[in-house]
Image (cartoon, rainbow, N blue to C red):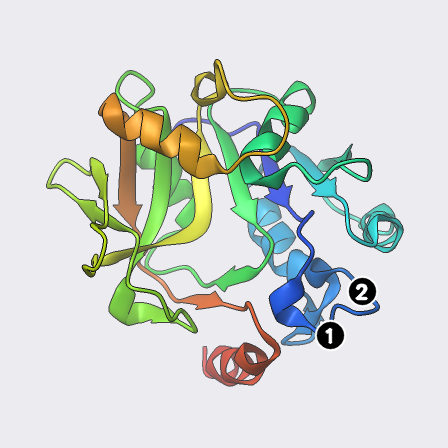
Amino acid sequence: MAVTIESAMVMAAGLGKRMRPLTATRPKPLVRVAGKPLIDHSLDRIEAAGIGHVVVNVHYLADALEAHLAKQKRRFSIAVSDERGQLLETGGGMVKALPLLRGDPILIVNSDNIWTDGPQDSIHHLARHWDGTRMDALLLLIRQASATGHAGRGDFHMDPDGRLSRRKAGRVAPFVYTGIQLISPRLLDGAPEGPFSTNILWDRAIEAGRLFGVSHMGQWFDVGTPASIAPTEAALSDV
């Protein structure tokens, strides 16, 4: 039986340096792809999954992003985690937002990727595989060969039980992190103060045998640069 996800966080506070010059006058989540701002693709999926509360963190050109969020007419409430004073990176951003979030597990989504569902809703797919007795985080992964727009060497290996390990230096790993995960608040227990990467939390969970993954069955697009927009739009027009 799938667990109920009460809230989600959309990571939207980055500087968008790789998306320049499009981010000279707007935050990256408001760059338009396939007819709508990037962040709206994520919000559409969250709404379709029936999640009732969303937190969005903001930093670069925060006023523009907040104004966009204020105009949303959604079936969920929206709260803003304000990082204007200090950009906290992915891990620090989650720690700051935690008091605004509800439930266990919590959905975390990066705002710079777009995905389509496979045979089932991808968020529900994660929820069905969540086991809080064994997991501190459950990452949605895609096979490297299917990671459209992604130029890396892969991120993780996954054993038959779904438990994850890191790609070794100089090697290739078969799975890429999609920017979509479920976490338990306990993943953040004892987290560092100030800015830090989620990788610190993941490495700790790997050591404890509590970082798991599940394979994404649909399409996924890494929309990180201006050059990635046209191929993504062309692929989405065929969906």
Say which element carries label 2: loop
**Amino acid at pointer 1:** Leu
Quarter assignment of residue 21: bottom right
Q: Residue furthest left?
A: 160
**Residue at horizontal 81%, vertical 35%?**
85
**Amino acid at pointer 2:** Arg
From the viewer's perspective, tell me whether residue 238 is left or right of residue 177: right
| 10 Å crowding of disc 1: few (<14), some (14-19), many (20+) | some
What is the distance, in whole Å, between disc 2 and disc 1 at their CAs?
A: 7 Å
Residue behind mark 1: 22
Q: Residue furthest front?
A: 170
Residue behind mark 2: 26
Q: Position of residue 117 (x, y in %)?
A: 41, 59
Say which element carries label 1: loop
Quarter assignment of residue 211: top left
**Residue at horizontal 39%, vertical 67%?**
219
